[in-house]
């Protein structure tokens, strides 16, 4: 019998009771799996958390509970602050992201010992102390607090909203029978269904991401379970605040009144899970704790769950201390054996991260962003862009050789040259485990077919002629005002003589290219850029001048009152050879409004690059990713480049530039993520290869951003170019990247040989460099010290105040 999920109900009583009650279990479970997979695909989540039992005192007397207990002589009524931090620090050190505070309900209303202990701690209520404890843990350890404090007033929930990223309350059951004499909830005023429904409703009104669920096997009927789920569904329909539904089995515990009660069997649990999935549809998260099902827990996946709940590597389940957590490695293996991928999550689910302004107190946003990846899940590694202290994780490998058919189909279509849809490209970025390895393998095979086994590189010098910029990009640690000496050193504005000297020195050291970029100096005009080109061309007539982003072209043309096309032609006459496709960041105006609101729009950037191609100037293309953007933005950006290349054929390469967060202003202010994860960074190169095929043949890796080991990973995942030797690099370094200033040709070729590939010294436009250039590069003398002309000196010593581009600032190179 097939059971379809119901549409949103009009009332709590609207549920598919008769159909679900009469359905056979295998058909019910099959339908639940199909619904689940339609919403969550292969992803199965868990929260790595630490449990902090703030107090075991409780005014309720649930007849199955061993967590709550009366005051004991010699035992503190509440954990003190230091005890809380000891537990939290252990969780942080073990890789947890969540601090789950468990506690009894309102013990001060029943016990004088609770009131006295709270007074000693400087509080009148348990909720007040809980709020302080959660703030303490967040500030001292960075763990994200989640609170399960029971029924609350509006004011109490609002207070906890300022210190917790989510809250929870198990509804358990709406059956009033269970609160009558002899029932499991008799004598527990906080278990009255109306009280608990009121708390859940208040959470919705206050926009609190919320966890709730049912407890099965305590005397309720299956019909009553459906009624309880229907009540939750109605509240979620009104407010959209329910993150997950927990279905938890009653466990009989010695020492309780229900010690001899019959526990629900596996079939009963599977039926309830499948019913919950069918009632709530594909998007809701349905959870069942694996430790309560012992060796049977892998079977719960067959009933439609997508989440395992909180798993702690350091603390027991204080509510069910007799039930140990499964080892995460074993949980991962069981999940993989079911054809799914285990992914750690935050106590805030990805859908809620997409709208933090609505769901989260602003003070909590920085901590959430710092721990999330581009898909809204928890960061899985300690690798950081540009940080030499955390090496790249091991390369992905095919463990079970079971990449999902949808992934295989998408990669096959891309390898055939088909254009993928935006949703399909975004789907590729969610890949993990076997799917990740499959994408990287496909990209590498396509690389071998397209460009062979050679890894190319260019001997180049970066010349950043000014770090003064009139724009205010929130990711940039390179640019500054004329008197700002904070990050990245003092403000400077190079003399034309210094630009000429560096260009000539680069040529003498074997360079075929100078890459010139800088800030958008407010005094620069189009003539400034023309003067820069002429200075470089006169200093080294044979060198390729790769300079000026689309933003600089826009700025220079505007100051001269001419079109970008005319300005580009004048720059060509002055010696310009090609343009870097920087200042692109993310080609999506939703993102640009957050990170570079005064910069070129997406359409303007694309128009100027297309104009450059029309007048005969080739360009590179870049993406600067891993900040406030999401996978759909990355997909949109890459597809925009593909369509541009279809029109013009002017792009030489695609260069992923992972966001360096260490000194970036928006990261320091807690307004962005901490750059992409290593998985995401490698995937960007692999997916770039696939999605841009066959139009853009070259995928370049930035060794400055990725580090040597990270770059070698990318060269095994579709990239074929190592970029430039970079005799000087200022922009990524200003943003906090720690990797070297120059990667010499002998070092670069040794690295290429270490992975069994053949080095190829190239020019900017991917022709082979001459033997004369190669000989010069391998016999290069040490660089002379650079001279950074102060802004006032620049004004005195030059006809026009020189500088321009690196508007891409601290991250776009």
Image (spheres, rainbow, N blue to C red):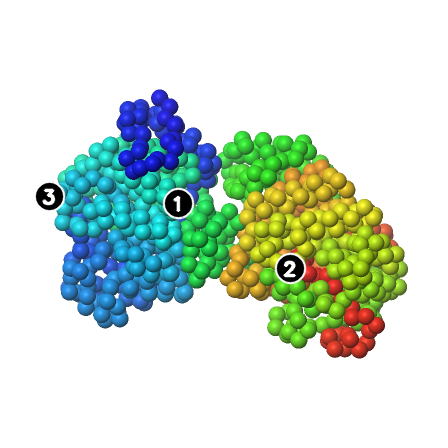
Q: Which residue is mark 2?
A: 598
Question: Residue lying farthest top?
Answer: 1
Q: Position of residue 85 (x, y in %)?
A: 35, 64
Please name the residue shown 28% across and 61% down the image: 127
Q: Is residue 406 left or right of residue 232?
A: right
Which structural element holds mark 2?
A: loop
Between the residue at mark 1 and the residue at mark 3, the CA separation in whole angstroms equals 35 Å
Q: Sort mark 2 into few (<14), some (14-19) or many (20+) by Cα contacts within 10 Å.
A: few
Q: Position of residue 352 (x, y in %)?
A: 44, 49
Name the disc covering residue 181, or none. 3
- Answer whether labels 3 and 2 touch (C-beta < 8 Å): no
Work out whether residue 644 or residue 702 is closer to the camera in this orientation and state it.
Answer: 644
Which structural element holds mark 3?
A: loop
Earlier sequence position, callout 1 versus callout 3: 3
Q: Which residue is mark 1?
A: 240
Work out whether residue 513 or residue 176 is closer to the camera in this orientation and state it.
Answer: 176
Between the residue at mark 2 and the residue at mark 1, the CA separation in whole angstroms equals 35 Å
Please name the residue shown 73% across and 39% down the image: 646
- Answer whether labels 1 and 3 touch (C-beta < 8 Å): no
Please name the residue shown 16% across and 44% down the image: 179
Depth check, mark 3 against mark 2: the one in front is: 2
Which structural element holds mark 1?
A: loop
Between the residue at mark 3 and the residue at mark 2, the CA separation in whole angstroms equals 68 Å
Specify the quadrant of the image occupied by residue 697: top right
Q: Position of residue 334 (x, y in %)?
A: 40, 38
Q: Is residue 246 left or right of residue 341?
A: left
Q: Is residue 49 visible?
A: no
Compared with residue 499, is residue 261 higher up or lower down, i.e. above or below? Answer: above
Work out whether residue 457 or residue 241 is closer to the camera in this orientation and state it.
Answer: 241
Q: Sort mark 3 into few (<14), some (14-19) or many (20+) by Cα contacts within 10 Å.
A: few
Depth check, mark 1 against mark 3: the one in front is: 1
């Amino acid at each position: 019998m097939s059971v379809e999920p119901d549409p949103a109900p009009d009332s709590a009583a609207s549920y598919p009771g008769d159909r679900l009650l009469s359905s056979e279990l295998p058909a019910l479970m099959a339908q639940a799996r199909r619904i689940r997979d339609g919403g969550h695909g292969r992803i199965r989540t868990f929260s790595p958390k630490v449990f902090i039992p703030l107090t075991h005192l409780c005014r309720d007397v649930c007849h199955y509970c061993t967590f709550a207990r009366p005051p004991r002589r010699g035992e503190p009524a509440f954990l003190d602050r230091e005890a809380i931090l000891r537990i939290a620090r252990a969780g942080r050190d073990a890789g947890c992201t969540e601090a789950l505070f468990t506690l009894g309900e309102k013990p001060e209303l029943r016990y004088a010992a609770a009131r006295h202990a709270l007074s000693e701690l400087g509080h009148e209520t348990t909720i007040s102390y809980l709020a302080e404890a959660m703030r303490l843990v967040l500030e001292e350890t960075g763990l994200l607090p989640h609170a399960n404090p029971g029924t609350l007033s509006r004011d109490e929930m609002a207070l906890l909203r300022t210190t917790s990223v989510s809250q929870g309350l198990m509804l358990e059951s709406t059956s009033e029978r269970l609160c009558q004499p002899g029932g499991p909830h008799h004598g527990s005023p906080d278990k009255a269904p109306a009280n608990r429904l009121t708390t859940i409703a208040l959470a919705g009104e206050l926009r609190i991401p919320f966890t709730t669920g049912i407890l099965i096997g305590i005397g309720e009927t299956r019909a009553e379970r459906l009624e309880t789920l229907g009540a939750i569904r109605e509240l979620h329909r009104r407010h959209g605040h329910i993150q997950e539904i927990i279905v938890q089995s009653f466990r009989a515990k010695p020492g309780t009144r229900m010690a001899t009660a019959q526990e629900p069997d596996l079939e009963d649990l599977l039926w309830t899970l499948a019913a919950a999935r069918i009632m709530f549809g594909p998007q809701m998260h349905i959870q069942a704790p694996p430790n309560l099902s012992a060796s049977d827990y892998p079977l719960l996946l067959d009933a439609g769950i997508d989440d395992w709940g909180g798993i702690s590597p350091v603390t027991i389940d204080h509510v069910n201390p007799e039930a140990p957590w499964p080892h995460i490695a074993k949980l991962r293996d069981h999940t993989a054996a079911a054809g799914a991928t285990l992914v750690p999550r935050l106590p805030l689910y990805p859908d809620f991260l997409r709208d933090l302004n609505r769901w989260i107190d602003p003070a909590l946003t920085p901590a959430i962003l710092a721990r999330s990846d581009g898909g809204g899940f928890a960061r899985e590694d300690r690798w950081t862009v540009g940080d030499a202290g955390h090496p790249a994780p091991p390369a992905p490998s095919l463990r079970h050789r079971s990449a999902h058919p949808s992934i295989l189909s998408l990669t096959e279509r891309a390898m055939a040259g088909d254009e993928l849809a935006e949703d399909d490209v975004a789907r590729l970025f969610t890949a993990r485990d076997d799917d990740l390895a499959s994408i990287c393998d496909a990209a590498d095979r396509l690389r071998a077919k397209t460009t062979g086994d050679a890894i190319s590189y260019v001997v180049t010098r970066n010349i950043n002629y000014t770090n003064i910029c009139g724009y205010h990009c929130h990711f940039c640690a390179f640019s500054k005002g004329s008197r700002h000496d904070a990050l990245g050193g003092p403000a400077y504005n190079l003399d034309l003589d210094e630009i000429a000297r560096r260009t000539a020195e680069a040529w003498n050291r074997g360079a075929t290219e100078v890459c010139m970029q800088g800030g958008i100096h407010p005094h620069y005009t189009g003539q400034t850029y023309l003067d820069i080109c002429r200075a470089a061309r006169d200093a080294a007539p044979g060198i390729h001048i790769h300079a000026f982003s689309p933003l600089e072209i826009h700025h220079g043309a505007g100051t001269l009152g001419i079109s970008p096309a005319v300005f580009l032609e004048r720059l060509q006459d002055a010696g310009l050879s090609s343009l870097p496709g920087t200042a692109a960041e993310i080609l999506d105006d939703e993102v640009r409004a957050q990170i570079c609101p005064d910069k070129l729009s997406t359409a303007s950037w694309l128009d100027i690059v297309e104009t450059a191609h029309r007048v005969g100037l080739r360009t590179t293309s870049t993406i600067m990713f891993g900040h406030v953007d999401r996978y759909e933005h990355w997909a949109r950006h890459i597809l925009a480049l593909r369509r541009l290349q279809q029109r013009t054929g002017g792009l030489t390469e695609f260069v992923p530039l992972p966001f360096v967060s260490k000194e970036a202003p928006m990261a320091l202010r807690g307004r962005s993520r901490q750059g992409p994860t290593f998985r995401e960074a490698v995937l960007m190169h692999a997916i770039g290869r696939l999605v841009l095929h066959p139009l853009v043949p070259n995928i370049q890796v930035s060794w400055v951003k990725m580090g040597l080991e990270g770059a070698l990973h990318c060269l095994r995942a579709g990239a074929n170019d190592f970029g430039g030797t970079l005799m000087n690099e200022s922009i990524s370094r200003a943003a906090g990247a720690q990797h070297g200033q120059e990667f010499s040709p002998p070092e670069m070729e040794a690295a290429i040989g270490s992975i069994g590939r053949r080095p190829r010294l190239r020019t900017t436009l991917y022709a082979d460099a001459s033997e004369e250039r190669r000989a010069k590069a391998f016999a290069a003398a040490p660089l002379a010290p650079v001279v950074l002309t102060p802004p006032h000196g620049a004004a005195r010593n030059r006809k026009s105040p020189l500088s321009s581009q690196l508007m891409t600032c601290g991250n776009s190179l």
